[in-house]
Amino acid sequence: MKGTGMSQPNSRLRSDRSFGRFAFGVAPAWTKGMSLGLLLIGVSLASASLCVWRSPDEDIADIYTAGSYKTVFQDISSDRQKVIEDRLGYALDPDETQFKFFPVFKGDDQIGTVMTHAGKGQFGVIEIVVAVVDTGTGAIVKAVRIQRDREKAKAAIRSDEFLGQFKGMTSADDFSISDTSLKSASDDAVRSSQAIANAVRKLVIVYDVFYGPGAGKSE
């Protein structure tokens, strides 16, 4: 999988294993007089989909058997944002002005890509890891993992029976939780199951827009 486009002009590539940092400094002048509660609400909304990759070595060994990875930051142009949103059928989250990709390598060959997303479950944020491989006509899902969650149906949404359904899916597939498509992890986990499915679909679409056939034509 050499030459999959992971070093496009608008990307920033880092080979160090940096899992993300958040900097907190002095509040700007316009925040004076605002309540702490309001500020916290703003922070919560703005970070709705931000998610770090917490166990890269473990996930790579489990999903790809072995390998190394790099970190690629891709800024979203207005044209690409429109393409993504049109395919999703809804707007990106406020913090999604940039996406982070983790191309995985065995030697010099790229064998896949990992992406992460924080979805809104029934009882809080669900941190989702999605591993894909590039077929030349777009991405297919290789594996899905749950990093963190607060769901009551924790075992069900992390089960191979539920997460295994995503293997082999593409952006053209039906990601709805229904009798005719994906099955819910359990009867009381329909909302969290759909949140996970939506996150997987979003990341596969985002990958295809950046690296699939015709990528860059909207720039």
Image (spheres, rainbow, N blue to C red):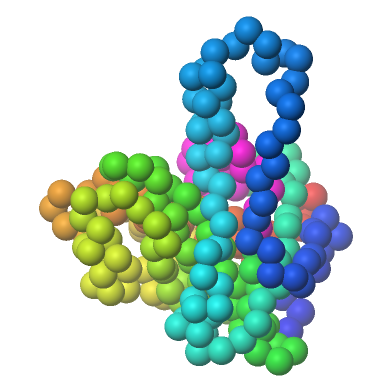
On the question of residue 219 being in view, the answer is yes
Nearest to the observer: residue 99 or residue 34: 34
> Is residue 77 highlighted in magenta?
no
How far from the left and from the top, in percent, is residue 22?
A: 66, 45
**How many marks do you count on the picture?**
0
User: On screen, 123 above or below 215?
Assistant: above
User: On screen, 103 above or below 89?
Assistant: below
Q: Residue at x 70, y 42 (%)?
A: 23
Point out the residue furthest to the right here: 9
How far from the left and from the top, in percent, is residue 75?
A: 74, 49
> Is residue 97 highlighted in magenta?
yes
Q: Residue at x 32, y 73 (%)?
A: 164
Q: Magenta part of the protein: which range? A: 84-100
* Position of residue 15 in the picture relative to residue 207 (left or right): right
User: On screen, 111 above or below 113?
Assistant: below
Point out the residue furthest to the front here: 26
How far from the left and from the top, in percent, is residue 206?
A: 59, 56
Point out the residue furthest to the top here: 33
For the N terminus, the image quarter is: bottom right
* Position of residue 219 in the picture relative to residue 130 (left or right): right
User: On screen, 116 above or below 45?
Assistant: below
Nearest to the observer: residue 178 or residue 29: 29
How far from the left and from the top, in percent, is residue 173?
A: 40, 62
On the question of residue 169 being in view, the answer is no
